[in-house]
Amino acid sequence: MAELLTAKAVLSWRQAMLGQGGESSALDWLLDLKGGLRWQQLQALRLYPESEIALEQDLGTLEQIWRQHLEQAIPLQYLVGRCPWRDIELEVAPGVLIPRQETEVLVDLALDCAKGDQLGSAPRWADLGTGSGCIAIALAKGLPNAQGFAVDRSAEALRQAERNARAILGSACLDFREGDWWDAIRDQWGQLDLVVSNPPYIPAAVWAQLEPVVREHEPELALNGGSDGLEALRTIAGGAALGLAPGGWLLLEHHYDQSKAVLELLEAAGLVNVQAHKDLEGVQRFAKAQRPLQPEQNRP
Ligand SMILES: C[S@@+](CC[C@H](N)C(=O)[O-])C[C@H]1O[C@@H](n2cnc3c(N)ncnc32)[C@H](O)[C@@H]1O
């Protein structure tokens, strides 16, 4: 409900909330997403403390959310039910991973592979482990002439991805498949020009030590990659030589210290042009590789 407030009242409420704990960036995110107070408007309030502003939610409701976040370590994205990502806004709920900023780079790398008709005029692609559908929706937007498949073993995640796709893309343009990695798209094997995946890759022992805000609220299926963190990456890399079309690309996100291991998995799978890519902080967090066009291309 809109509430007309003075700048002074908003700023002193903000100070009081920060006094309870938490990060100012998180509180400002809440003010923006739930209160409708954009960052520039917040700066203007500081300059003009006598001005008035109408928030989209009353401060009592915002305070309730903030306290729940602090006291129960629930991610704000789940409490607000939304998460901006790239140029879209996704609905998110417990049971579905909150999309991370670094994964935006994976989409850019994937779209680069498809630049200038490199994959043909009507490529086929798949997003393995789609979660909220963030990658699949971004690829569908970037590759409007392509046929896309979004796979997840979690029925809850897949339903969320479908709802997000319908809200953002409109009528059905993605094929949603519930099941295991490559198995869920067995009928497409050998025809996929681009396969992208941000699978669970956190080693089990590291997962067990994650902050409660992640470990206790985000789905373990989305994060826990088994004893060495590579279980899903091994399966996905291992299936690529059969699943991809000749010349097709596989792009993977992985943990900060898995680059060498993932590149070895891709080479062992018979893929070529194996490359590591960095995230926005300069850490090698992505790998890409291609199925050889001819079997000979792969021989030493
Ligand atoms: C790290 S999350 C990525 C979600 C989303 N793509 C993103 O980037 O935010 C991994 C996803 O893989 C799914 N997943 C886990 N095991 C799977 C399996 N065996 N087959 C298919 N999907 C699986 C999880 O349910 C989860 O949605």
Image (cartoon, rainbow, N blue to C red):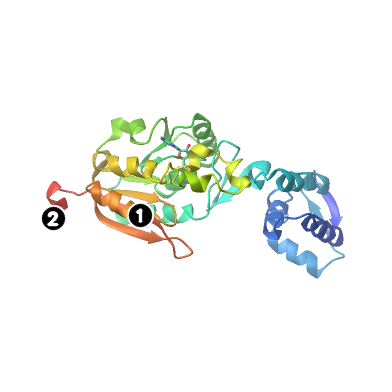
Which of these two is toward me, 247 or 76?
A: 76
Quarter residue 182 falls in: top left
Residue 287, numbered label = 1
* One can see residue 91 in this view: no
Q: Is residue 36 left or right of residue 247?
A: right
Q: Amino acid at mark 2?
A: Pro
Residue 142 in percent (x, y) is at 42, 50
* One can see residue 50 in this view: yes
Quadrant that contains the C terminus: bottom left
Counting every numbered tag in the picture gives 2
For the point 52% across and 45% down, which residue is it? 207
Q: Is residue 180 left or right of residue 220?
A: left
- The correct choice, above or below, for 39 with respect to 154 in the image is below
Q: Secondary structure at mark 2?
A: loop
For the point 39% across and 32% down, which residue is it? 180
**Residue under label 2:** 300
